[in-house]
Each structure stands twice: as C-alpha cells, then as structure tokens.
Amino acid sequence: MRNIFRKLAYPQLFIPLFSLIILALIIMATFRLFAYFYEDYIITASGRKNLEFNVFYLENDLFHDNPVPSNLDFLMSYTDYIEIYSNFTADFSTIMEVYYDYRSEKRVIIRYIGSDDHGFVFEERFPLNETRGQMTTNNLRFGAVNDGNPGGVYTIFPKDYIELYFEFVENQTRQMEEEGILARGLRGFSAELWIEFRYSIRSPETGLNEMVTQGVRIPLTTEIYSFMMTGSPSFDWQTNLTIRDAQITLPMSVLFVASFALSLFGLLYNIKKATEDPNVYKQEVKNILKKYVGEIVIYDKPTIVISE
C-alpha cells in the first residue's frame, strides 16, 4: 500500500487532477458571473435632435433688426435667406460601439390648393448632407460647427424655390393651352419647402436601434409665413442585457464536457499506471489472471496421481 501512495505522488498524475480542479473552478466562476449578470444590469440611452433658425431680411427702411426676432411671423418679400442650425446629442449609460447614419435634404412640394395635406402634384428633392460613421463612446455631440460631421448650419434662399414654383405653374398653364383643356374652377397651386434631418443610431452589441427625425416646413406661396416643426426629435431607450447574454450556449457546453472528459480520462489512466507492477511481465500475468479468472484453476501444490 505504501508503494501505491508513493506512485500516486508522480507528477504526471497531478496534471489531470489539477486540470479537473481548475475546470471545476472555471465552471463555478462562470456560474457566479452569470448570477451577477442576472442582477438588474440595465443599459439606457437617450437622444435629442435640436433645430433652430434665423431669418435675415434684405436691407430695407422698415425692419432694422437682423436676424428678425423669432417671435414674429415673417414676410417673404423681405426675406433674403434663412439659417437653420441642426444639432444632435445622445448619452449612453456605458461606453459602447455606436454606428450613426445622418441624412438631410430639401424638398419642394407643390400641391393643388383644394387637396388635403398629403396630396402632392409635384415633388423635387435636393440633398444637403449624408454622413455615416462609428464611434466607441458614451455620448455623441453633433452639429456645433460645419466640420464634416452630422449637422451644422445650413443657409437657405427661399426665392430660388419660388422661381421653381413659377416655372411649374408656367409649364402647367402652357400644357393646358396646348392640349386645349379648360379646367373649370381651378384654384391654382401652392408650394412649400420642407427641410428634413434624420439621425439613425445603432449598437449591435446592446440591441440599440433608434432614429430621430426633425424638420421644418416653410410656405413659399404666401406673403406672411411661419415655420412648422415636424418629426419625432427625441428617444429614450433601455435594455437589460442579462436576459440575452447570460446563458450557456451549445459551444460552451461542448467545451466544458470535452475538457472534463479528457481530464477525467487522464486522471484514471494515470491512476491505473501508478498502481501497476513495474515489472511488465508480472503485470502481464496479473492481467491474464484477472481476465480469465473464471477459467484458470491454480493449485498451491502439485497433485500426485498413483496408478495401480
């Protein structure tokens, strides 16, 4: 028995034994980590799109403040240009990899005066900016200056699009004359300039996928006008990552089972080798006797048979 324990002290026996112990510790630590994840580990995010504008008048003897105070309605015949300031902010409760997509455009909408708000007879789009990128951060700040990032300051000259409206009316009137069509009760058309901004934010690792839109509608065919804000300029989002991430996957299970089986096999094999007789011939005899124990008869003394 003493020889067996001495053999069990061989280093090759402790390698699989320690492997089993380490594997058990890893499994315990993993489940403790999962248990920690199952606490309320909530990630939140919020974002807001802000839009401001200033109207600048032509030089005149009536209005001396430029830009015009924003509490007033505006006169199209006096308007020289409009500056629109677009900025966006987003805050995250943790640092994450965020992908953003920004698009802005102008749209000239012409509708029949007698139609509802969605009835267009003509539409033309003019892109302003399109930018996309990626950042690893816990906040986004876009739009302070025109630096190539999303947002910034855009200068709009309404009269350019009023001329487009006049061209449309002229072409439409000429078309009716050429075709000999007389439209009775035709009320005419109206035009608007829509300026729209869209920010898309997503983070694959957390499941964040949000979009904010905001814009202004400026009437072009009325002398007195004001700005109409449109869109959904903000979002609030949260998720609990424990529901999705704290689970044992099939590859993890296969890895644990394979590691455990190999370590157990190594341990049993080394125990077997450590308990064998160092004399290979004696051990072979023992193996044969063990295998055929039910068929071999062993006598301590030879039997003498005396024939008569």
Image: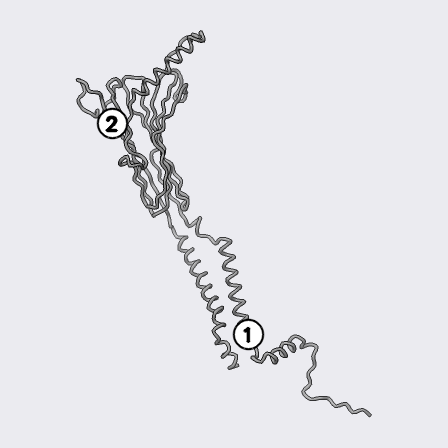
| Furthest residue toward right | 308
Considering only vertical position in the picture, is 7 above or below 75? Answer: below
Instruction: Say whether residue 213 is visible.
Output: no
Residue to which mark 2 is pinned: 54
Instruction: Say whether residue 131 is visible.
Output: yes
Residue to which mark 1 is pinned: 273
Quadrant where the C terminus sits is bottom right
Question: Would you say 161 lies left or right of 31 here?
Answer: left
Q: CA distance from mark 2 to mark 1?
A: 89 Å
* Occupied quadrant, residue 149: top left
Considering only vertical position in the picture, is 169 above or below 12? Answer: above
Question: Would you say 70 lies left or right of 292 here?
Answer: left
* Occupied quadrant, residue 286: bottom right
Amino acid type, residue under disc 2 in the picture = Asn
Residue 170 pos. (x, y %): 37, 12
Q: Secondary structure at mark 2?
A: strand
Amino acid type, residue under disc 1 in the picture = Lys
Measuring 37% from the left and 14% from the top, which residue is drawn there?
169
Measuring 49% from the left and 72% from the top, which residue is drawn there?
12
Label 2 Cα neighbours within 10 Å, binned few <14 / some 14-19 / many ≥20 = some
Q: Secondary structure at mark 1?
A: helix
* Occupied quadrant, residue 115: top left
